[in-house]
Amino acid sequence: MNQDPKRFTITAALPYTNGPVHIGHLAGVYVPADIYARFQRLQGKDVAFVCGSDEHGVPITIKAKKEGITPQEVVDKYHAIIKKSFEDFGITFDNYSRTSAKIHHDTASEFFKKLYDEGKFMEEVTEQLYDEEANQFLADRFIVGTCPKCGNEESYGDQCENCGTSHNATDLINPKSAITGATPTLKETKHWFLPLDQYEPFLKEWILKEHKKDWKTNVYGQCKSWIDDGLRPRAVTRDLDWGIPVPVDGAEGKVLYVWFDAPIGYISATKEWAEREGKDWEPYWKNDDTKLLHFIGKDNIVFHCIIFPSMLKADGSYIMPDNVPANEFLNLEGNKISTSKNWAVWLHEYLEEFPNQQDVLRYVLTANAPETKDNDFTWADFQQRNNSELVAIFGNFINRVMVLTHKYYNGVVPKPSAFSEIDEQTLKELKAYPAVIESSIERYRFREAQGELMNVARLGNKYLADEEPWKTIKTDEARTQTVMYVALQIATALAVLSEPFLPFTSNRLKNMLNFEGLETVPNWKSIRQMVPPSGEMPLGKGGHTINESELLFSKIEDEQMQQQLDKLQASKAMNEAANKKAEPQKETIQFDDFTKLDMRVGTIIEAEKMPKTKKLLVLKVDTGIDVRTIVSGIAESFTPEEIVGKQVTVLVNLAPRPLRGVESQGMILMTENAEGKLVFVNPASEGVTNGSQIN
C-alpha cells in the first residue's frame, strides 16, 4: 500500500465502442474516477488520468454485421460520440485515447513480443469451437451457452455476466454460435497461453495477504474465489480478422485477445499523453512512488486483478495496482440496463435534453452510487434529489447569501465585528470538513464524501436560520455584518469543496464570489488551514466585492420526468415488438370452416364503461343488419368518447355470451401494432358501408 505517493496513475475502464456511454457506466466507473482525479489535483498531486475507446473484440464485429458497415466505421462513429460526451460532461481525462491508434498497436505488440521472446507463454494446439456454417472459429462473444457454474443459459464464451465467473468457451454446456445459431464443432488451432497457474503464489501474497483489509470486499472476495478454485492457463490470442495481429511468425489470421490488448491501452494512453506533454511516461508505470489505481465495474474484476497483474508480473518492470475500487451495477427503473434492448439513459441524449445540468446527474449518480451493492436509478429519485437537495439546500443557501450581501452591502464583503460563540463554533466546524471529505475520498467512499459536502450547505442554512440577519439588520448592524461575513466564508468553502463532485457548479460559484479578484485564491488547503474567527479566512477579512448572483440549480417539473418515462416505455415496446415472435400457426382448417365465419363492417354508435370493471366497455354497434350489444375488453386502451363513430370489423355469428350480466352478441377484431398498442383491424378500404361482408 503506497501511503505517500509522489504521483498518481488513475485509469478508468475502456468503454467498448459498440454503443454510447450510459448512466450505468458513469455511476460505476467514470464519475468516481473523475472525483478522485480532481481531488488529487486539488491537493497539488501529479496526476495522469487516462482512458480510451476499446475498439477491438467480438462485440464490435457483431455490431458491424448488424448495422451492415465495417468494424472501423463502427468504432469511428462511437469513439466520436463517447469522447465528446465525456468532454461535455466534465470528465477530466488527461488523455482519452483509442486502441486503434498506432501507438497502442505498437505498445501491445511490443508487450506481447517481449513476453514471447522470454518464453513466458505456452504455445499449444488445442481444439476450439468452430462454426461450420460461418466457416470460422468462434471467439468468446460469438458463443452463447449454459454457464457450468451457475446454470445461466446465456453465458458468453469468456465470462458469465450472471455470476461473474471467467471461463473458456469450451467450458460452456450446450454452446451455440451467436452468428448462425448452429451447434459448433471442435477444430484444432494453435494459440498462445499465459500460464496463470504459475502466478498463483504471487497473487496469493499480493492480494490475499497485502490487500485483505484495504480492498473492497466484493473485489477481494471475487479474487479469493478465483484463486481458491485454482487458476488455469488463459489463451491470449484469438482466431479473428479484427484486432491487433499477433506479432510472431506462424500466427497469420490471429489477433491478440481483447483482454490482453485492452488493459495495455492504459499504458499506451499514458505514453501518448507523456509524448504530447513532453514528459517521461515510465515513472507513471514503473516507479514505486507512483500509486496506480483502476476504476472499473464488477464485471471486469478478474481482468484487472488476476490477468493484467499477471501480465505485468510476467514483464517484470511494472508496478502493481495499489487498489481496484470496483463498483456494483446500476439498474434503471427496476430493470437491468441493457444496451441491446435500449433500456438505458444515454449520456449524449441526457446532455441534449438537460442542457447545463451535468452536475445534477453527477450528484444523483454519486448519491445513489452502487458502491457496495446494486442500486436503482429512477427519474422520480432524480427529480427529488434535485428539488429537495440541490435546489432546496445547496442552492437555497447560496442564493440567500448572495442576495443579502448585494441588498445590504452592494456586493461588498462586510468587515466583521465581535464574534459570538456560535460564530466561532460554526467556523470551527467549517474548518474540519475538508479533512472529513478527504478521508472518505481516500477510502473510495464517494457517496459518503458528497454527503459531507451537503452537510456544509446544511451548516450554512442552519446558521442563517438561527442568526436571522434579515431581522438583525433592523436592530444590530454590527451583528449582521459578522453573520454575513461568516456565511460568505461558508459559501467560499462550498465553492472549493464542491469542485470534485459538482465542477460546473463550483466554477459558477467561484465566479459569483469573484475569486479572480482576490489576492490569494481560496483552495482546499486554505479552507483546511484557516484560522477562525479573526485570522486568515478563505474570502479575506472584508472589503472584497463579489459579482452578481445567479441560480445554481433549477427545479425540475413533473412533465420533464414523464417525458423520460414515456421515452423508456416507448423504447421497451419497440424492443419487445422487434423481438416478438409470431404465434405458431393453429391447426389446419378446411375452407368450409372458414366460410362459416360471418365478418361484417360495423360502426360503433355508443360506448360506455361497464361498472366495477377496469377492462370492459359496453358497445352498441350498427352492423348493417341490426344494432347489437358487444362487450369488449379494450377499456384500458381506449376511452368511450374516442371510439364512438369508429368503423370496425365485427364477427357477427359468434354465439352470444353473458359477461357481467350483459349479453355480448359478437366480437370486435383487434391486434397489436409494432409498439405493442391495441389497434382495430379496420375494413380494407374507405367508403365501405355497414353490413358489407369481409370475405
Image (cartoon, rainbow, N blue to C red):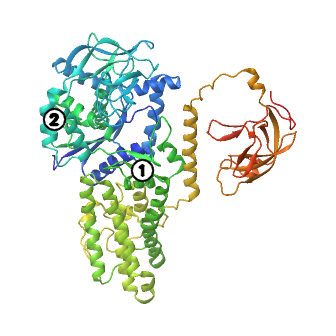
Secondary structure of the residue carrying tag 1 is strand
Give the total of numbered labels. 2
Residue 328, quarter of the rendered image? top left
Q: Residue 60 or 108: which is nearer the viewer?
A: 60
Residue positioned 37% across, 69% down in the render? 458
Which label sits on residue 203? 2
Separation of residues labelled 2 and 1 (CA atoms) = 34 Å
Image position of 224 (left or right of 493) = left
Dot 2 crowding, Cα within 10 Å, few <14, some 14–19, many 20+: many
| Residue type, mark 2 in image | Leu
Label whose residue precedes the other's in the sequence (2 or 1): 2
Residue drawn at x 35%, y 80% is: 482
Name the residue: 51% across, 23% down: 69
The amino acid at mark 1 is: Asp
x, y percentage for residue 343?
Answer: 49, 41
In this orientation, does residue 630 appear? yes
Q: Where does the image place residue 453, in percent across and percent down from the top left?
A: 34, 62
What residue is drawn where x is 53% and y is 22%?
68
Quadrant position of the C terminus in the picture: top right
Using the image, determine if residue 521 lies above or below residue 155: below
> x%, y% of residue 203?
16, 35
251 w.r.t. 325: above or below: above
Q: Nearer the viewer, residue 303 or 607?
A: 607
Q: Position of residue 10 (x, y in %)?
A: 28, 42
Q: Is residue 351 above or below residue 14?
A: below
For the residue labelled by badge 2, is the local secondary structure a helix, a strand or a loop? helix
Is residue 647 or residue 529 the one in the foreground?
647
Which disc is residue 376 wearing?
1
Q: Quadrant of residue 103?
A: top left
